[in-house]
Image (tube, rainbow, N blue to C red):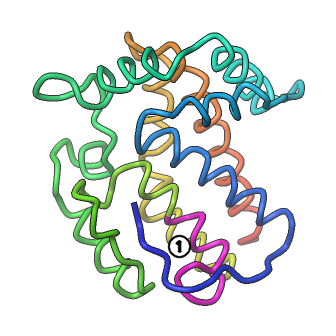
């Protein structure tokens, strides 16, 4: 996860909602959710959209899950003995190997944006949870002034768009996914929405 540099300034309500969803995904993917986070998830409500249905399914599963059961699922999916079922890193999805060029490019861009890895975090920065948090921080201005739409699009297209959709789709259909199946749905649909919004903004 990343370390904020400055206090978050005021931004447009729709951007605040985007940042909150990025942060929500980051929280679910960085560590196993606590009982408190599961209770928050259980209170969510969705609508008839694909995103809303994913949120509603997540809420239903959260209401029936315990922190211990979801922790076991998290460990099986992402940690495992040796490795988990999924490797949630940009380098792996983009090159087939860990710690490759995508990570080096990300570190250069992080330095330019004054984004620093938190001192208690040891995973490579191209972890999906860290990238979700970075996008939230860029939107909200945690690392300086809020990033422009163009700056957000550049970061998204370079570090997230090439692989996050396939990762979330893999999470949806992973053999050991139960609670994390709708997390995958929410992430996949949100990435599609963001991609289309950036495309339209660029026209």
Residue drawn at x 79%, y 29% is 43
Residue 44 x/y as whole percent = 79, 31
Q: Residue at the location (84% across, 29% down)? A: 45
The residue at the point 59 percent across, 36 percent down is 188
Q: How many marks?
A: 1
Residue 156 image position (x, y, % from top left): 53, 63
| Membership of 89 in magenta stretch | no
Q: Is residue 44 above or below residue 120?
A: above
The region drawn magenta spans 134-147
Q: Quadrant of the N terminus?
A: bottom left
* Looking at the image, residue 8 lies above or below residue 72: below
Tell me where residue 146 sits by quadrant: bottom right
Few, some or many residues within 10 Å of mark 1 (<14, 14–19, 20+):
some
Left or right of 45: which side holds 8?
Answer: left
Q: What residue appears at the point 67 percent right and 79 percent down from the top-left corner? A: 8
Seen from the viewer's position, the closer of residues 155 and 10 is 10
In the image, residue 140 lies in the stretch drawn in magenta: yes
Residue 55, percent from left and from top = 73, 29
In the figure, is residue 179 to the left or right of 43?
left
Tell me the residue that label 1 is attached to.
Answer: 154
């Amino acid at each position: 996860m990343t370390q904020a540099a400055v206090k978050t300034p005021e931004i447009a309500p729709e951007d605040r909602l985007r940042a909150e969803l990025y942060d929500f995904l980051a929280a679910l993917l960085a560590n196993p959710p606590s009982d408190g986070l599961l209770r928050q998830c259980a209170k969510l409500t969705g609508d008839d959209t694909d995103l809303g249905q994913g949120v509603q399914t997540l809420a239903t599963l959260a209401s029936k899950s315990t922190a211990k059961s979801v922790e076991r699922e998290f460990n099986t999916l992402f940690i495992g003995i040796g490795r988990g079922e999924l490797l949630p890193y940009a380098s792996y999805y983009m090159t087939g190997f860990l710690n490759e060029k995508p990570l080096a490019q990300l570190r250069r861009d992080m330095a330019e944006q004054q984004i620093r890895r938190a001192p208690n975090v040891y995973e490579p920065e191209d972890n999906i949870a860290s990238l979700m948090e970075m996008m939230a921080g860029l939107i909200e201005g945690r690392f300086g002034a809020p990033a422009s739409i163009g700056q957000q699009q550049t970061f998204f297209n370079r570090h997230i768009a090439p692989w996050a959709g396939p990762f979330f789709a893999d999470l949806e259909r992973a053999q050991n996914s139960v609670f994390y199946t709708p997390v995958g749905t929410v992430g996949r649909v949100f990435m599609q929405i963001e991609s289309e919004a950036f495309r339209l903004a660029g026209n």
